Structures are given as C-alpha cells and as structure tokens.
Image (cartoon, rainbow, N blue to C red):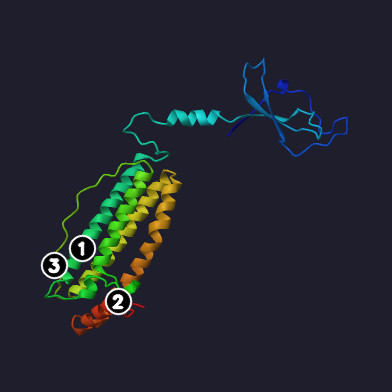
Amino acid sequence: MLLRAAPSSCFPSFSPLNGGGDQLVPLFSSVSTLTSSSSGKSGLVVMCAATKGGSNSKPLSGVVFEPFEEVKKELDLVPTLPQVSLARQKFVDQCEAAINEQINVEYNVSYVYHAMFAYFDRDNVALRGLAKRFDDCGADCRFFKESSAEEREHAEKLMEYQNKRGGRVTLQSIVMPLSEFDHVEKGDALYAMELALSLEKLTNEKLLNLHSVASKNNDVQLADFIESEFLGEQVEAIKKISEYVAQLRRVGKGHGVWHFDQMLLHGDGVAA
C-alpha cells in the first residue's frame, strides 16, 4: 500500500488532548474521505481518531493513503497477448534457461541409469538387485531402475515449476549412454557404482549452479525451491552411494558381488 505525507495545510490543527475532556478511541478507528480544492485531488483516504461521541474527525498525523496507486502499476504489467504468460513475475530469462539446462541434466542421468538397469538385468549378468528394486524392498534396496525413475521425476518437478513461474520448458537432446559396464580390473558392479557416484556429484554441482543463478538474480523463490526439493536429497544420495562403493571395493569381483546384490535384492540392509 502506498503512503504519502499530505501537506499540513490540508488539515486543521489537532491536539491529542481536546478541551472537552473526551477520550480517544484506539488509533485509526474512523476513516474519512477528503477532497482538497487546493491540490485538486479527490478520493484520498485520511485516517482519523474519533472520540467516544464520534464527533472528532481530525486527522492523526497528516498521512494520506492512496491504496490503489500501486495496484494500478501492477495492472499495467499484466500482458494482453495470448502467447505471453500471465503468471510470470520477477522471473528473468537467465533463471528460465538455467532450469531448462537442469531438466536436461536430470534426463541424461536418468538415461544412463536406465542403461545400467538393462545391463544388469541381462540373463548372462543376472544381478537383479543392482538392476531394480522389488516392491517388498526397503528404502535402501533401490537401485538403477528406481534411480532412473527418480531422476525423471526430478526433471518433471522442474518442468512443473518452470510452468508455474511462467517460463517455457525447452527440452534438449539426450546423449546416448554406454551399454557395456564391464571393467577388467574393477568388475561391472564396482565400475557402475563409481559411475553412479560421479553422476550424483555432477547433478549436485549443477543444482548448486542453478541455486547460484537464482541468488545472483535475487530470485528468492527459485532458491528456496532448489533448497527444499533437491539439495538435501542429493547429499543423502551421495552418502549412500559412497558407502556402496566402499563395500564393493572390499568384496572384490567374485562371490562378494553376488552377496552384495542379494542384500540389495532382498533388502537386508546394505550400507546400514
């Protein structure tokens, strides 16, 4: 609400203690509309104090309220073209582009995880715990199939937010991922898990960059969205996958990998 001080000439003199001994009711108990011939303005709202008898209409401080002035300015910002967003407010192009870039990151990571799921689900690899999660597993037994779905959910959440702020979602191309994950020295399970850890750290770095763009452009709402929806979850994911990598490095490439996979498959508390 816009406030401006009115000229003192607009108001009669006012004393908090009037001669009649009347007591003032609480501040701003009455409102009157004043028309000033000297200023040529009408419709100005003046806040006054009234006595118990209701006879006093003297203004308290000479402050005049013009409640619709700021609204008029906002109305001028409402677009009339049908192709322009009505909801967009204080949302710069740089933030819009950064969100689209993060959507692409999430889809690319999801694509790699989906390729890992396909690899570990092969009949001659048959590590089903690494490939996917069963419905009866706990929260710790998810892996590549569930990870792929989770990254797609992140992309969709960013798309919904982009639309909510009045931006335009622009999907970009997705890089073709690897289809083979076997490694002579590390074995496929450890190699894939180290790659997953690298992807989670890359995603976290990109989210921090997005948060930085929001902060530089004073977009508090975007910064809060990234903090509340993504950053804490990324820290948890990096910690959990780091433990998986450490365990796979201990067990080697043989029977230990099968045992690790069985714990993922049946939810026996890997990295508990």
Question: Which residue carries the number 3 mark?
Answer: 180
Within 10 Å of the Cα at label 1, are there few (<14), some (14-19), or many (20+) other Cα atoms?
A: many
Q: Secondary structure at mark 2?
A: helix
Q: Earlier in the sequence, mark 1 or mark 2?
A: 1
* Residue 248 x, y percent position in the rendering: 25, 78
* Residue drawn at (33%, 31%) of the image: 82
Is 131 drawn above or below residue 154 in the view shown? Answer: below
* Residue drawn at (88%, 34%) of the image: 21
* Residue 100 x, y percent position in the rendering: 29, 47
* Residue 243 x, y percent position in the rendering: 32, 74
Q: Amino acid at mark 1?
A: His
* Residue 143 x, y percent position in the rendering: 27, 69
Quadrant that contains the C terminus: bottom left
**Do the residues under discs 1 and 2 have CB atoms within 8 angstroms?**
no
* Residue drawn at (16%, 76%) of the image: 126
Within 10 Å of the Cα at label 2, are there few (<14), some (14-19), or many (20+) other Cα atoms?
A: some
Q: Nearer the viewer, mark 1 or mark 2?
A: 1
Q: Secondary structure at mark 1?
A: helix
Q: Amino acid at mark 2?
A: Ala
Q: Which circle marks residue 246 in the picture?
A: 2
Q: Which circle marks residue 114 in the picture?
A: 1
Label 1 and label 2: CA atoms lie apart by 23 Å
Is 184 drawn above or below residue 58 in the view shown? Answer: below
